[in-house]
Image (spheres, rainbow, N blue to C red):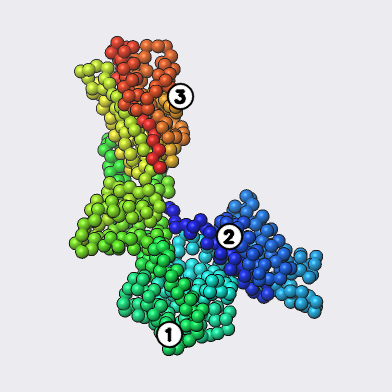
Amino acid sequence: MRGNTRQNHLWLLPVAYFIGRCQVFLGNPLAVGFFVAVCLQNKRVYLTYGCLMLGLWQSVSREAFFSYGVCMGLLAVVLLARGCVVLRRDPTVAALLSGGIFVLVNVTIHIINPGVTSGIRVTFFETGYDRMQLATIFLEGFLVFSAAVLYGKAIRVMEDDFAAIATENEAAISAMALMISVLYGMPQKEFYGIVIAETFGLFSILFALYVFGYGLGMAWTVLAGLVYAGTTGDMSYLIGWVTVAMICSVVQSILLGGRILFGLLFGCIYTIAGIYGFPVLLQERGIKAICAGMFLYLFLPKAIVLRVEGRVNRENVMKNSTAWGTLVMQRVQSFAAAMKRIDYTLAGNTNIGIGFSELSDMLNGFAGNMSQTVPLNKTMEAKLIEELTAKQLQVKDLLLVKSKESRFTIYMTLRAKKHRMVNAEVIRRIAEQVTGLSLGITEESRRIVGAEYTMVCFRECARFTYQTAVRRMSRYEEQVSGDNYYIGEIAAGKLLVMVADGMGNGQKASLDSSTLLEALEELLDAGFDQSMAIRIVNAYLAETNKGEHFATLDLLLLDLYTGYGSLYKQGAATTYIKRGEWMELVKSTSLPVGVIDGAVCEQCTKKFYNRDIVVLVSDGVLESIIFENKEDYLRTLLAEAETDDMDELVSGIVDDIRSMSGNRLKDDATIVACKLVKTL
């Protein structure tokens, strides 16, 4: 799923500049830690390096500037190397290694030229404090490691799941550590009459109080007040900001207003506090800062100023939810229906080779195909609930389910307020916009949401759709064709196409082929492995018919999400794959289904592309061609066909065969043509 990308990571650049201005022990190991975090994310690395170096140029000595520049360059080479992909998967180990490299580089520089060090400068070396200087280098290395871990977590949270700050302690701590560093590195100089640090401090307090509520909002207010009061040397800022935030939160909890009301309330309380208790707040710089901060707060996009306090359901993926229970019951019922089908199909047959081991494989296969719940991105969840609430919908459960093939399905249990009726299509559009997925309403979903809690279900749309055409012809007009076919979707996004040719003609041949297809469709739809399903049906037919009756099988199972398809052939005629003027033939030399128990089913997997055409035929089609090389003739016929309309293509083949055979077919004949069409 797509998250909310913060302008392609451009926000990292000003953050890098401000962190580059921070000073710790007269140096800035935080800048190196931030650079390591960015390298591990592999986002805007070179631009971030430039911004950090610009900040370092303004905050540290030239010797330290050189030392940090060399160290960050070496770390970039190590962390971005192709061979370090595995290392980047474990941020803690990578951060520890980076801290060690930092220490090694600075100790080496100190040995080569004692006058060039990072951290505490030449003063200590000149007075003989080598041990103190070495201890400082190791302390800075530890800060590099710690900052890389904290900043890395903060970047991931800010990029992928901003609302997690409200529910996860690690996310909250890391995000506040990053923002404290930014505030600490901001200059106290005026920019067009506005002090950047004070403006950011007030804006961030207003933002945190509204978005995250009293707890996190007050925690950030205290931290921001401490940092700003420390940089200005005036503790009135700390006391004043905390007082304003506390009163504003209490009044807001009574009024229960929205974003605009909260912003105006904050401005009014700030003004009153400045008049009656904290004059420093209403100095010229303070007035400009609060006006600029409120302007930013009020005019930021709604998607960014999204209130998540009290919105996020921490138990949204509990497996005892209504949606999960319904999903499990549906899957169990599907499996039970398949087992019942097996029992009916194999009734009276005890010598079919299906024992406890095979039954265990069936159960394991079923369990493996069960979907799993995954945590819904909390930012998406909060935004989704807010958008649905705006449509007068009350959400009870939100469940995100991922299949074995990583297909997403969203289940929602919700109801409409004020006796309204809401079409599921409205909800689908909201879910699609928030998640960034192309979603479709599933068959089991309710289409209208009313006053009672109702479950609606949306599944990720496939990348491909298909067009098909079929011609089924009997050799004798007075008899039913012994061929049968099946075309349909199973297991959400899997296209199943089958052609079966029963031995001989008439009712008995038709019964054999239809039994084969019905049993396979039932088993595959329930989630059984294709090979096992074919083996079960083959065992049944071999035992029942004693090899006297059988049917050929041509099976195509195509994943409409990826375009990968598997062809299974057992005694079937040649399959034709057409891609423009290029043709491929897939042949079979195996025995038909039901001849002997344990007959081999040939299988191959291929990647199909947009507008590829697969043509499956029964033996009767080829036998009706009068030329000696029948397969080559049909291949040439398909390759030269100029139409990509399936009905026209199949009709052309039928007309050609009937014409050359004098309308006297040698056997029952079936043609199934399927074209893959890309939709996304």
Q: Is 622 placed above or below 21 here? A: above
Q: Nearer the viewer, residue 186 or 223?
A: 186
Residue at image position (47%, 83%) is 282
Q: Is 211 placed above or below 570 here? A: below
Residue at image position (30%, 63%) is 389
Pointer 2 or 1: first along the chain: 2
- Per the rendering, the mark at residue 273 is 1
Disc 2 versus disc 1: nearer the observer: 1
Q: Amino acid at mark 3?
A: Glu
Pointer 3 or 2: first along the chain: 2
1 and 3 marks in contact (CB < 8 Å): no
Q: Amino acid at mark 1?
A: Ala
Q: What distance separates the C-alpha of mark 2 from that of mark 1? A: 41 Å
Pointer 1 or 3: first along the chain: 1
Asked which secondary structure carries label 1, the reply is helix
- Per the rendering, the mark at residue 581 is 3
Q: Give x and y (percent) for residue 20.
A: 62, 67
Q: Amino acid at mark 2?
A: Val
Residue at image position (40%, 45%) is 365
Asked which secondary structure carries label 2, the reply is helix
Q: What distance separates the C-alpha of mark 3 from that of mark 2? A: 49 Å
Question: Which residue appears farthest toward the left when viewing the image?
Answer: 419
Local packing at callout 2 (Cα closer than 10 Å; few below 14, some 14-19, many 20+) is many
Q: Is residue 28 left or right of residue 387?
A: right
Q: What distance separates the C-alpha of mark 1 from that of mark 3? A: 80 Å
Q: Give x and y (percent) for residue 41.
A: 56, 57
Q: Nearer the viewer, residue 521 or 400?
A: 400
- Per the rendering, the mark at residue 38 is 2
Q: Residue 635 sits in which quadrant?
A: top left
